[in-house]
Image: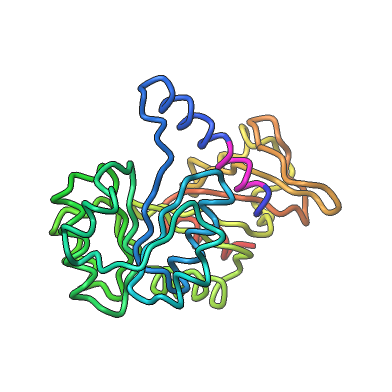
Amino acid sequence: MANFLHSLRRRRHKRLAEHAAASGHGDQRVAVIGLGRFGSSLAHELIRRGWDVLGVDTDPHLVQRISDDLTHAAVADCTDPETLRQLGVHEFSSAVVGIGTDIEASILIASNLLEANVPNIWAKAISRQHGQILERLGVHHVVLPEHEMGERVAHLVTGRMLDFIEFDDDYALVKTVAPAISTGLPLGESQVRSKYGVTVVGIKRPGEGFTYATAETVIEKGDVIVVTGKIRDVESFAELS
């Protein structure tokens, strides 16, 4: 599923890059504030994808450990709006608040970024309540990594899913062994979508890689499929396998 998702993301990133180039918003600079496990992992991945990353933390040891890997790194307290200004964060297209344990600092930094009119702000939250406060402030994207990972593992432990990824608006992408009710007919004739409310988007036969599913695709017994739809629908569909 990882290769299939990578292919989907690659197409999406290409479209976003083309849109950014066409609209003149191709600035790929991001400030990551808070370089703990979450922030440092995120910063490394962004660097791997070719972004310019400014990493900031109040802990000099964390900054020293990651400084050689980033475009820029600084020991600074971003709860002070003047510090943000001096770092030039207001000129960045995106910023991520990776601080979780110090909720007061997280909220203050998020407020400062909003005041600085940073176009895209992400913030890590350690609880639903923390996330709600950040959303009310106006943070564009709130991430609950521990909560979201817990939900994902719960789906894998209790169901017949091989992988589960939840998206906004109660939708999910699921990898599962094809139920018998979906085999033997082209997808256009099996009426999987109309009967079960899910869409088969990919298929993997034993010994082969994932391929995109079409209306002519015939699913066979033992195939692994990727389906998308409302969470309750993909859960019910996976339980049929």
Task: Looking at this view, name the residue that lies furthest to the right.
Answer: 207
Q: Nearer the viewer, residue 176 or 236?
A: 176
**Is residue 191 visible from the viewing direction of this image?**
yes
In the image, residue 207 above or below residue 109 = above
Location of residue 151 by image quarter? bottom left
Residue 44: x percent and y percent? 54, 59
In the image, residue 74 above or below residue 226 = below
Q: Nearer the viewer, residue 3 or 188?
A: 3
Q: How many marks?
A: 0
Residue 58: x percent and y percent? 33, 73
Task: Looking at this view, name the residue that lies furthest to the front.
Answer: 86
Q: Nearer the viewer, residue 16 or 87?
A: 87
Left of 17 or right of it: where is 169? left
Residue 64: x percent and y percent? 49, 71
- For image coordinates 24% across by 67% down, the residue present is 131
- For image coordinates 77% across by 53% down, the residue present is 221
Task: Looking at this view, name the residue that lies furthest to the top.
Answer: 22
Task: Name the main secondary structure of what is drawn in magenta.
Answer: helix
Q: Nearer the viewer, residue 107 or 240?
A: 107
- For image coordinates 36% across by 53% down, the residue present is 31
**Figure quadrant of the N terminus:** bottom right
Residue 9 is a magenta residue: yes
- For image coordinates 24% across by 46% down, the residue present is 90
Residue 216 is a magenta residue: no
Left of 96 or right of it: where is 9? right
**Is residue 232 visible from the viewing direction of this image?**
no
Residue 159: x percent and y percent? 56, 72
The region drawn magenta spans 4-10
**Figure quadrant of the C terminus:** bottom right
Left of 10 or right of it: where is 210? right
**Coloration of the structure image:** rainbow
